[in-house]
Image: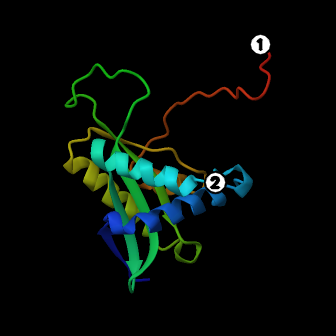
Amino acid sequence: MTYTIRKGSPADDHTLIRHYRALWESYGVDPINIKGDAEDVTLDFIMSGRRHYALATFFAEMDGVPLGSLACQVEHLPYPDVTVPSFRKHGYIWSVFVEPTARRNGVAAALVQAGIDYLRTIGCTKAVLHSSDAGEGVYLAAGFMIAKEMRLDLAVPHVS
């Protein structure tokens, strides 16, 4: 399969949004659990990311048809960051999606490499992402390591 990777532009936002929704559906999320305004919420997130967090998008294409996409940006932390950027400026990769018919052809790996390269150019010191089970092999092959994250399901009563 011969494809090209290119940097996206605002004209590609609707493709990224379509891929992002398809990503959630591929995880088995019932459409009833996806917000009715999901496209608007995602577009607002993309536009804010461009304004404040150096968001970039990348697309894999064959004959002008999008096969996959990726978004990445400077990570926005949910807590105060008291370190200097030369010590800790994390880039976050999100929305890695490849059309089912194009999977297992290196498309995801090429998109991830484009994201990593971009995050390096903007001075990020580390790349971070959350992986699905299906994507874990791609990320491990790219040099990512499994890191510890702890979670507690607050919707289920917790017994100590």
- Residue at screen point 41% across, 23% down: 79
Residue situated in front as seen by the camera: 158 or 34: 34
Question: Which label was assigned to residue 36?
Answer: 2
Mark 2 vs 1, N-terminal side:
2
Horizontal side of residue 64 vs 34, given as left or right: left
The percent position of residue 64, horizontal first and vertical second, equals 38, 83
The percent position of residue 133, horizontal first and vertical second, equals 61, 51
The outermost residue toward the bottom is: 63
- Residue at screen point 36% across, 21% down: 80
Q: Is residue 46 above or below residue 103?
A: above
Residue underneath mark 1: 160
**Around disc 2, counting alpha carbons within 10 Å, would you say few (fewer than 14), some (14 to 19), or many (20 or more)?**
few
Residue situated in front as seen by the camera: 47 or 137: 47
- Residue at screen point 41% across, 63% down: 13
Horizontal side of residue 65 vs 55, given as left or right: right
- Nearer to us: label 2 or label 1: 2
Question: Which label was assigned to residue 138?
Answer: none
The percent position of residue 148, horizontal first and vertical second, equals 52, 30
Q: Is residue 19 above or below residue 133?
A: below
Q: Tell me the kind of residue under disc 1.
A: Ser
- Residue 160, quarter of the rendered image: top right
